[in-house]
């Protein structure tokens, strides 16, 4: 993240992040609040990046689109249950 509030992913995608700092009783920053839509977009970007990296590492036969969707959903369901 650079200092002007934009999250840079690679060279192409830029996402403006609207940050609100949460301060403690000594006026020291302890957390950051961002709008849920921006959080969800960041989460999606990170997830896509992780999936792309995983796909680069796998040397197995690729799944069909339907198989991939089913497998991905099973991973999401497993992570939600954890």
Image (cartoon, rainbow, N blue to C red):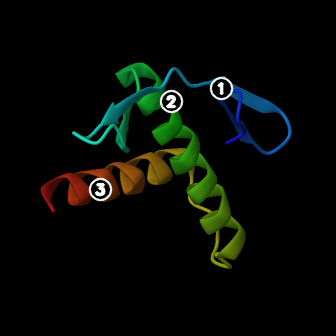
Which residue is drawn at the image coordinates 22% and 60% (left, top)? 78
Category of crowding for the residue at label 3, using alpha-carbon neighbours closer than 10 angstroms: few (below 14), some (14–19), many (at least 20) = few
Closer to us: 44 or 6: 6
Q: Which residue is mark 3?
A: 74
**What is the distance, in whole Å, between disc 3 and disc 2 at their CAs?**
21 Å
In screen coordinates, is 23 left or right of 53?
left
Please, what secondary structure does the residue beneath circle 2 have?
helix
The image quadrant that residue 27 belongs to is top left
Q: Is residue 82 above or below residue 20?
A: below
State the residue position of label 2.
41
Q: Pointer 1: what residue?
A: 15
Residue 79's x, y, as percent? Answer: 25, 58
Q: CA distance from mark 2 to mark 1?
A: 9 Å
Q: Quadrant of residue 36?
A: top left
Labels 2 and 1 touching (C-beta < 8 A): yes
Q: Nearer the viewer, mark 2 or mark 1?
A: 1
Q: Earlier in the sequence, mark 2 or mark 1?
A: 1
- Residue 70, horizontal then vertical, whole percent: 37, 50
**The C terminus: image quadrant:** bottom left
Residue 58 rendering spot, x and y as whole percentages: 64, 75
Pick the quarter of the image with the N terminus: top right
Q: Report how far apart the C-alphas of labels 3 and 1 lie in the structure.
A: 29 Å
- Secondary structure of the residue carrying tag 3 is helix
């Amino acid at each position: 993240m650079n200092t002007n509030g934009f999250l840079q992913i690679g060279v192409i995608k830029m996402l403006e992040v609207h940050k609100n700092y949460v301060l403690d009783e000594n006026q020291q920053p302890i957390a950051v609040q961002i709008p849920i839509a921006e959080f969800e977009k960041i989460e999606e970007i990170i997830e896509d990046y992780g999936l792309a990296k995983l796909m680069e590492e796998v040397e197995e036969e690729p799944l069909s689109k339907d198989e991939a969707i089913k497998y991905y959903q099973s991973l999401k369901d497993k992570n939600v249950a954890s």
